[in-house]
Image (cartoon, helix red, strand yellow):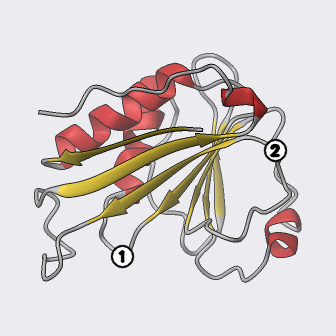
Amino acid sequence: MSEHRFEVPDAEAMEALGAYLASQLRAGDLVLLNGELGAGKTTLTRGIGEALGARGQVTSPTFVLARTHPTASGVPLVHVDAYRLATAAEVEDLDLDFEGSITVVEWGAGKIDGVVDSWIEVDIDRPIGGDPEADDAPRHVRVAAYGPRWEGVELRPAPPT
């Protein structure tokens, strides 16, 4: 497992982190985003989408659960909001193409168990007492990679400035 921790100072830097992650991703990759409301999960996903050349605006799929964005490479970006889902079985019921897509799941902790054997997990914490609507409040971020896909791959995003 590869793990890195750092502070992300603002929304622009969070999008830059997403762009870095996008540069490492290919079809079949899964990224789990954890963090409370307003932490920056969708902002990070927007950075992934922009770097992949995703069509359509990357917004939170809260009410549709999953949104698929075609990308410049032809590998779709699937953006999932698992907040209202309780189990991995409910995620499987969405019938997502994990093998043929780059899949980003917000609120995915404990809900993707056994669905894939490799993934990246991004935990985003905003300071206690921070305004959840303040995009430019610094966030503490942990990026960790698990499973055989990421063995020997050193995910080392440059700390945002």
Mark 1 lies on residue: 37
Q: Position of residue 142 (x, y in %)?
A: 39, 50
How far apart are labels 2 and 1 at the CA level?
A: 27 Å
| Amino acid at pointer 2 | Asp
Q: What residue is shown at x 79% (from left), y 63% (from top)?
A: 113
Mark 2 lies on residue: 117
Q: What residue is shown at x 45% (from left), y 35% (from top)?
A: 48
SS at badge 2: loop
Q: How many marks?
A: 2
Q: Is residue 42 above or below residue 13?
A: below
| Mark 1 closeness class: few <14, some 14–19, many ≥20 residues within 10 Å | few
Q: What residue is shown at x 72% (from left), y 70% (from top)?
A: 111
Q: Nearer the viewer, residue 3 or 45?
A: 3
Q: Position of residue 153 (x, y in %)?
A: 59, 21
Q: Where's the N terminus, which quadrant?
A: top right
SS at badge 1: loop
Looking at marks 2 and 1 on the same chain, the residue that comes earlier in the sequence is marked by 1
